Amino acid sequence: MNRIQGLVDLVFNEIPPVYLIIGSTVVFFGMGLLAFFVRSKAAQRPISPVRIILPPVFMSSGLLMFLFTQFQVPKTQVIEAMVVGLLFSTILIATTNFEHKDGKLFVKRSKAFIFILAGLLVFRLVAKLILSSSIDVGELAGMFFILAFSMIIPWRIGMLVKYKRLKKREGLSVR
């Protein structure tokens, strides 16, 4: 653990914050594109409760970042990030729907998804540029993780509820 903390300290002490901001923005845009393509491919396969639940489970490993002081966020900022994440999740819940094909349920392709994803990317970029002048880069990373996690949990719960309702309404067995 001390070695990892030493590496984190080295990165945050030796690399100027502007480079960390630029690098994390480039990585975030790359991840956004990857999310778009993964979501597009996923729409071609039937959805299941496991496929709905796994993304937040995998994402929860990111909570380990808060073991390091650079990423720790004050309680007030945790609450702010959670509220913003919850607000964004309502958009995702409202625009995520399913369709019934051949006795299976699929996530319905939404034209709004690309605009929502692009809007989130732009929001994050603008917020990062504004907030990076007053909040440390690591702390900002922690806040954006909290925002994303607070968005994905309710969204996936909403998806699961919609999924089970549709399965029941269509008379399909719920696994």
Image (cartoon, grey):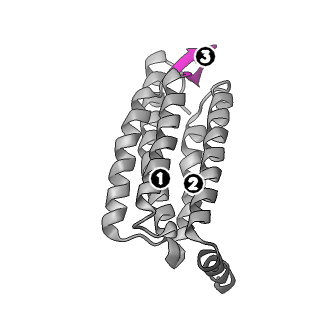
Residue 11 part of the magenta-drawn span: no
The secondary structure that most of the magenta stretch takes on is strand
Q: Residue at 32% of width from left, 60% of height from top?
A: 79
Q: Check the image and report above or below for 122 versus 166.
A: below
Q: Nearer the viewer, residue 132 or 117?
A: 132
Q: Is residue 116 left or right of residue 32?
A: left
Residue 106 part of the magenta-drawn span: yes
Q: Earlier in the sequence, mark 1 or mark 2?
A: 2
Disc 1 to disc 2: CB gap under 8 Å = yes
Percent x, y of residue 172: 53, 21
Name the residue beneath numbered marker 2. 59
Q: Amino acid at mark 1?
A: Phe
Q: Is residue 39 left or right of residue 122?
A: right
Q: Circle 1 — which element?
A: helix
Q: In the image, which is nearer the foreground, mark 2 or mark 3?
A: 2
**In this picture, which residue range is highlighted in magenta?**
98-109
Q: Is residue 95 left or right of residue 23?
A: left
Q: Amino acid at mark 2?
A: Met
Disc 1 to disc 3: CB gap under 8 Å = no
Percent x, y of residue 32: 60, 42
Q: Earlier in the sequence, mark 1 or mark 3?
A: 3
Could you classify mark 2 by the number of other residues whose Cα lies within 10 Å: few (under 14), some (14-19), or many (20 or more)?
A: some
Instruction: Identify the disc placed on residue 103.
Output: 3
> Could you tell me how far apart the alpha carbons at marks 2 and 3 are, in whole angstroms?
30 Å
